[in-house]
């Protein structure tokens, strides 16, 4: 007897050569869907390891564009006659300010010193002698008043004088000391009278020119025409128009990037990027700029200042002093 068994089904959706429409829950799942589920499951740990690797090999820091800035001060006291306006472009050696000030004429001082007559000198000697006598007299009166005050104190302790008598002696002593100080002040003033006369010469007006030390753009002006300024007062600030460099603030945990020759990428908020190289590393930590929280940059209370030089000249539109930028460092190795 020959027994024929049914052939095994070749597919879950085919039975004895007849196509069967099974429900969606019983149909065969395509293989690509399992790979999709596996990829979604591995996405979170993969992102975690990618973040660790990125943090170990890369670093983002704050930075600003720095132009060579010069603060110009008044060379002498005087009145501002002319002053360049803010935003003006000046060349090296160009006059940026004119100050009208007074100077003492040496010839006039010498001629005045020779006009002091003998009568004036004799008058000054006599006046000085009288003042010296007055000072000596006041000193003697003060000495007597001090003795009387000491005696009154002794009598008061013995019960032979009243408090009012002691206070009166003290007031008299204070008045005499005040008179002595006034007499000594008059004597000092008389001693310097001739010196003042010899040094008193006529003053002549002169114009002081202030020139630009480098080709630059005037970024700030602190005075106006007709204003009186003293020697050393700030007149204006000039920013160099040719060279610009980047000052980056590295947090303490990224000190491995503070190496001369380390390459970095400078990113502007306009989307432009430029390559740069570390040129100088500061030997002192400073307070770094604060982060807005949504720029992805690290923020630290203290940071190491690093100077970077762009490999190409920045466009004129980006040469703005203190313009914020992002600095991206990439390490060459894990160590």
Image: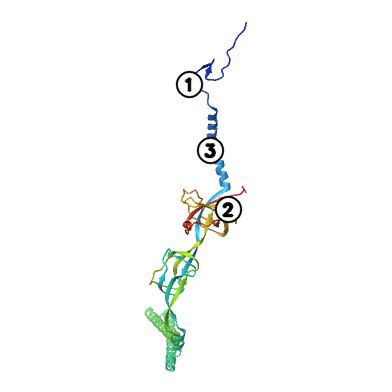
Which residue bears the numbered disc 2? Answer: 263
Quarter containing the N terminus = top right
The local crowd at label 2, few if under 14, some if 14 to 19, many if 20 or more residues have their Cα within 10 Å, is: many
Would you name the residue on which mark 1 appears? 23
Residue 97 visible in this rendered orientation of the protein: yes
The local crowd at label 3, few if under 14, some if 14 to 19, many if 20 or more residues have their Cα within 10 Å, is few
Q: Is residue 17 above or below residue 84?
A: above
- Nearer-N-terminus badge (1/3): 1
User: Quadrant location of residue 97?
Assistant: bottom left
Residue beneath disc 3: 44
**Viewed as shown, does residue 5 lie left or right of 117?**
right
In the rendered image, the vertical position of residue 268 relative to residue 194, given as above or below: above
Q: Residue at x 50, y 59 (%)?
A: 66
The crowding category of the residue bearing disc 1, from other C-alpha atoms within 10 Å (few below 14, some 14 to 19, many at least 20), is few
Q: Position of residue 241 (x, y in %)?
A: 49, 62
**CB-based contact (under 8 Å), mark 2 and mark 1:** no
């Amino acid at each position: 007897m020959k027994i024929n068994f049914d052939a095994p089904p070749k597919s879950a959706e085919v039975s004895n050569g007849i196509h069967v429409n099974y429900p969606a829950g019983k149909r065969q799942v395509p293989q690509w869907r399992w790979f999709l589920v596996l990829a979604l499951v591995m996405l979170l740990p993969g992102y975690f390891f990618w973040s660790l690797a990125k943090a170990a090999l890369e670093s983002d820091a704050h930075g600003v564009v720095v132009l060579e800035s010069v603060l110009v001060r008044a060379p002498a006291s005087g009145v501002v006659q002319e002053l360049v306006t803010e935003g003006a472009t000046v060349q090296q050696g160009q006059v940026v300010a004119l100050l009208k000030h007074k100077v003492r004429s040496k010839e006039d001082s010498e001629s005045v010193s020779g006009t002091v007559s003998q009568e004036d000198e004799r008058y000054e000697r006599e006046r000085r002698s009288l003042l010296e006598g007055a000072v000596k007299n006041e000193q003697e009166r003060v000495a007597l008043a001090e003795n009387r005050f000491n005696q009154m104190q002794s009598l008061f302790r013995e019960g032979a004088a009243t408090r009012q008598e002691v206070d009166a002696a003290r007031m008299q002593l204070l008045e005499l000391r005040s008179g002595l100080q006034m007499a000594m002040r008059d004597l000092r003033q008389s001693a310097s009278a001739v010196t003042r006369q010899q040094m008193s010469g006529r003053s002549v007006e002169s114009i002081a020119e202030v020139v630009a030390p480098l080709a630059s753009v005037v970024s700030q002006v602190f005075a106006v025409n007709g204003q009186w300024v003293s020697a050393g007062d700030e007149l204006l600030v000039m920013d160099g128009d040719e060279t610009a460099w980047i000052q980056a603030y590295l947090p303490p945990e990224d000190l491995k990037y503070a190496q001369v020759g380390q390459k970095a990428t400078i990113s502007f908020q306009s989307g432009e990027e430029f390559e740069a190289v570390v040129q100088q590393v500061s030997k002192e930590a400073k307070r770094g700029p604060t982060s807005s929280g949504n720029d992805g940059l690290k923020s630290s209370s203290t940071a190491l200042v690093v100077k970077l030089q762009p490999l190409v000249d920045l466009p004129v539109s980006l040469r703005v002093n203190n313009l914020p930028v992002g600095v991206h460092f990439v390490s060459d190795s894990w160590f």
